[in-house]
Image (cartoon, grey):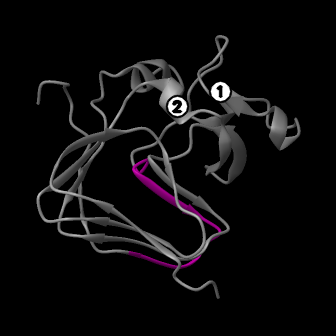
Amino acid sequence: MAELWGVVVIPDGQWTSGRIILKSGARLHLNDGAVLRFSGDIKDYQPAVLTRNEGYDVMSLGAMIYANGAENIGITGRGHIVGPSTDCEMYVKNRDYLVVEQCVDITKPISERLCDGLEGRPVLLWCSALRLPLTCTTSICTTAISRVRSKASA
């Protein structure tokens, strides 16, 4: 198992970010007064990463907080994590697709199953897109994760 080697501290205040990738041994800590808001802009989640949806592996935007194959990772603290509004760019581009088979040809190799929102390709999201520990071990989450808000002004 990987040793804990680094803690990224989000201090008190309002912060906006694109995708955060946790590597083995990393912990994201939000101080009590920290609010981490995630962008809804597709460019902030590039390049596409391995994502699993409905039992299929695809290359998509991943989650706001993403990890793949990591060990001993965590999200801690009393701060808040807030997802993008449902009227943002990535949610708008996602609305026409209900199942993964509508987005990509599942017979193609995984590297060609692109749902990254670029060059007219669709975006593949699901409600739990705030955090995605994919094939990870020993992951913890003790911070408050707020629901995705329905309007940017909410």
Q: Which residue is mark 2?
A: 98
Q: Is residue 119 left or right of residue 154?
A: right
In reply to whether residue 144 is colored magenta, the answer given is no
Instruction: Give the quarter of the image for residue 74.
Output: bottom left
Label tally: 2
Q: Position of residue 80 (x, y in %)?
A: 20, 56
Q: Amino acid at mark 1?
A: Gln
Q: Secondary structure at mark 1?
A: helix
Using a 10 Å C-alpha cutoff, classify the residue at mark 2 as few (fewer than 14 neighbours), some (14 to 19) or many (20 or more).
Answer: few
Magenta residues span 128-140
The residue closer to the viewer here, 61 or 20, is 20
Q: Is residue 33 above or below residue 142?
A: above
Which quarter shows the C terminus? top left
Q: Residue at x 49, y 37 (%)?
A: 125
Q: Residue at x 60, y 72 (%)?
A: 24
Question: Quick check: marks 1 and 2 in contact, CB under 8 Å?
Answer: yes
Q: Is residue 145 above or below residue 91?
A: below
Q: Which residue is mark 1?
A: 102
Q: Is residue 98 above or below residue 8?
A: above
Q: Position of residue 145 (x, y in %)?
A: 26, 58
Task: Quote the CA–CA distance across marks 1 and 2.
Answer: 7 Å
The residue closer to the viewer here, 51 or 8, is 8
Q: Amino acid at mark 2?
A: Leu
Q: Secondary structure at mark 2?
A: loop
Residue 47: assigned label: none
Q: Residue at x 19, y 25 (%)?
A: 151
Q: Position of residue 56 (x, y in %)?
A: 71, 49
